[in-house]
Amino acid sequence: MPAPLPPLLTTERLRLRAWLPAADAALVRTLWSERDPRARYRIDADGHPTVAEMEARLAEQLVVTARTGLALLALERRAEGDVIGYCGLIAGQSSAEEPEIAYELLSREHGRGYATEAARAVVHAATTAGLPRLWATVRVWNAPSFRVLEKLGFHDSGRLDPDAERGDTVWMTRDLRGPAVSG
């Protein structure tokens, strides 16, 4: 098994850190509410998931991180000290040996390069940890995520999971044993 990802990564503008469930649960709930309106995970009429439910999910993620070495990390702007999303690695639909990179930002922070900056740090950490390959799953309509992944050297794997309701999912991949990608 590859080495675990470090619990803290820093970039010029960002700090990627382990979740603080009580402090970060409201932000994660907001992210869920902002997702594509077709997403089945949006907050329902009864207010679910609640902040308490999100806090429990974040605590569960910390347990998974301890077991697998994979982590979704809170994405915090260094100068402002505010959490604006997350970025990290999950087993997701792949495996712990070849995990998926995942990221999500508050909509007000889109278009500022934060996702690319954070994902670049995660790809570097995954390479340093000895992971051979990363995957990413992206809905066909999510052009900004495709741009982020392409900047990081991901390419279409040829796998497509059809989903007429939410949009087909494209599997992107990046071999970490090759040359580094800049940009």
Image (cartoon, rainbow, N blue to C red):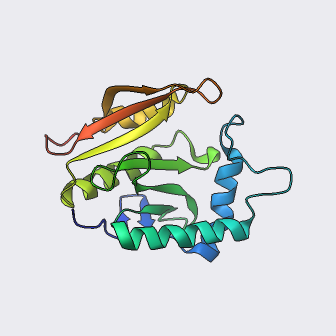
Residue 71 or residue 10, whichever sits in front: 71
Q: Give x and y (percent) for residue 50.
A: 75, 64
Residue visible at 33% across and 49% down in the picture: 120
163 over 49 or under it: above or below: above
Q: Is residue 33 visible?
A: yes
156 over 134 or under it: above or below: above
Q: Quadrant of residue 5?
A: bottom left
- Viewed as shown, does residue 63 lie left or right of 1? right
- Viewed as shown, does residue 173 lie left or right of 59? left
Residue visible at 41% across and 63% down in the picture: 71
Pick the quarter of the image with the C terminus: top left
Pick the quarter of the image with the N terminus: bottom left
Residue visible at 35% across and 65% down in the picture: 9
Q: Give x and y (percent) for residue 64.
A: 44, 68
Q: Is residue 18 visible?
A: no
Residue 121 or residue 167, whichever sits in front: 167
Q: Give x and y (percent) for residue 63.
A: 46, 73
How many discs mark residues in the rendered view? Answer: 0
165 over 36 or under it: above or below: above
Q: Residue furthest right?
A: 45
Q: Give x and y (percent) for residue 101.
A: 39, 48
- Viewed as shown, does residue 108 lie left or right of 117? right
Q: Quadrant of residue 160?
A: top left
Residue 125 or residue 134, whichever sits in front: 134
